[in-house]
Image (cartoon, grey):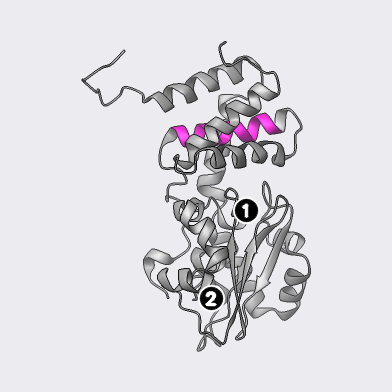
């Protein structure tokens, strides 16, 4: 039935499908509305790059923590109280003067939720997913992150199990900074590998 | 590069562009958990849905994937 007049509150076809699916799943005991609310709230408030930034800052100030983090990401991240869905197998890859790491999920959108939250739209887009494995240096330059030719670029394609987090290089001139000050320098994009702090 | 726009977000930045995206996201988590499935059970459908229609908006592919998982698991027919 076509309707030329669109009311602001009229649900779109997709919204109607989602509503119908939720009603069905609730009826079948698969999920409760409260559970969905909690998930949404967790993704909105508890998971996010502010968590990853704390992990990075801790690694910058504490070489022993950094060693543990690079050896096995998930338990080291748990030391700071972060963990949960999509965080069971986190591998942290370290940027050095010779190596620049960048993360992509070529098939869908795999991403370390507990330390970065939900991925940005560009991370999920077909161009990013295809081009980052094919032409990483060019794409990074386009995204405002030029990497010198002498620096090796390692592209990590998230598999079914592993989620990657980039440990950026600590910026010069931050010797006296506190962990909180250091964390404030760490951006989401730097932890994906498309920016340098 | 620094700048306020690039700082890690705290509370307030939207995780979803629309409420329905959050609902379908939460539903997928819930279904997988209730059925005791590995996340890869949903992810396989998501990968297929994205491949099926690469230019479809991401969460619409997510919805299609969840509908496929639900049908697969015999929870409901698509014409119920």
Subunit that carries the residue with mark 1: A
Neighbourhood count class around disc 2 (C-alpha, 10 Å): few under 14, some 14–19, many 20 upward: many
Disc 1 or 2, which lies upstream in sequence?
A: 1
Q: Which mark is residue B7?
A: none
Which residue lies at the image location 58% right of the left edge and 84% below the top edge?
A151
In what quadrant of the picture does the N terminus of chain A appear? top left
Image position, residue A180 (x, y; %): 54, 71
Q: CA distance from mark 1 to mark 2?
A: 20 Å
Q: Which mark is residue A182?
A: 2
Quick check: do tags 1 and 2 share a chain?
yes
Using the rendered image of the protein, determine whether residue A133 is visible from the camera's viewpoint: yes
Start and end of the magenta stretch?
Answer: B20-32
Magenta stretch: includes residue A98: no
| Label 1 vs label 2, nearer the camera | 1
Up the image or down, A152 lies above or below B68; here it is below
Which residue lies at the image location 65% right of the left edge and 28% below the top edge?
B69
Subunit that carries the residue with mark 2: A
Q: Are marks 1 and 2 in contact (CB under 8 Å)?
A: no
**SS of the residue under disc 2:** helix
Extreme left residue here?
A: A5
Image position, residue A121 (x, y; %): 45, 51
Is residue A60 shown left or right of residue A49? Answer: right
- Closer to the camera, A160 or A64? A160
Principal SS element in the magenta part?
helix
- Closer to the camera, B57 or A181? B57
- Closer to the camera, A148 or A168? A148
Quarter of the image holding residue A162?
A: bottom right
The residue tagged 1 is A114
Using the rendered image of the protein, determine whether residue A35 is visible from the camera's viewpoint: no
Which residue lies at the image location 43% right of the left edge and 21% below the top edge?
A16
Up the image or down, B63 lies above or below A81; here it is above
């Amino acid at each position: 039935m076509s309707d030329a007049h669109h009311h602001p509150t009229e649900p779109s076809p997709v919204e109607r499908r989602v509503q119908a699916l939720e009603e069905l799943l609730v009826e079948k005991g698969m999920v409760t509305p409260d559970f969905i609310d909690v998930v949404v709230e967790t993704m909105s408030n508890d998971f996010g790059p502010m968590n990853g930034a704390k992990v990075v800052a801790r690694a910058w100030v504490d070489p022993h923590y950094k060693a543990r983090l690079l050896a096995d990401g998930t338990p080291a991240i748990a030391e700071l109280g972060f963990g949960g869905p999509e965080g069971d197998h986190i591998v942290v890859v370290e940027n050095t003067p010779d190596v620049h790491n960048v993360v992509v999920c070529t098939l869908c959108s795999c991403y370390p939720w507990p330390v970065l939250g939900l991925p940005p739209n560009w991370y999920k887009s077909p161009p990013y997913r295809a081009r980052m494995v094919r032409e990483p240096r060019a794409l990074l330059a386009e995204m405002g992150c030029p990497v010198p030719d002498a620096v090796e670029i390692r592209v990590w394609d998230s598999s079914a199990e592993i989620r990657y987090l980039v440990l950026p290089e600590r910026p010069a001139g931050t010797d006296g900074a506190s962990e909180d000050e250091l964390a404030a320098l760490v951006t989401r994009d730097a932890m994906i590998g498309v920016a340098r702090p | 590069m620094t700048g306020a726009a690039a700082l890690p977000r705290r509370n307030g930045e939207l995780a979803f562009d629309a409420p329905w995206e959050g609902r379908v996201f939460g539903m997928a988590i819930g279904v997988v958990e209730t059925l005791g499935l590995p996340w890869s059970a949903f992810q396989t459908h998501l990968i297929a849905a994205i491949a099926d229609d690469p230019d479809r908006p991401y969460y619409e592919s997510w919805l299609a994937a969840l509908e496929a998982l639900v049908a697969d698991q015999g929870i409901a027919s698509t014409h119920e």
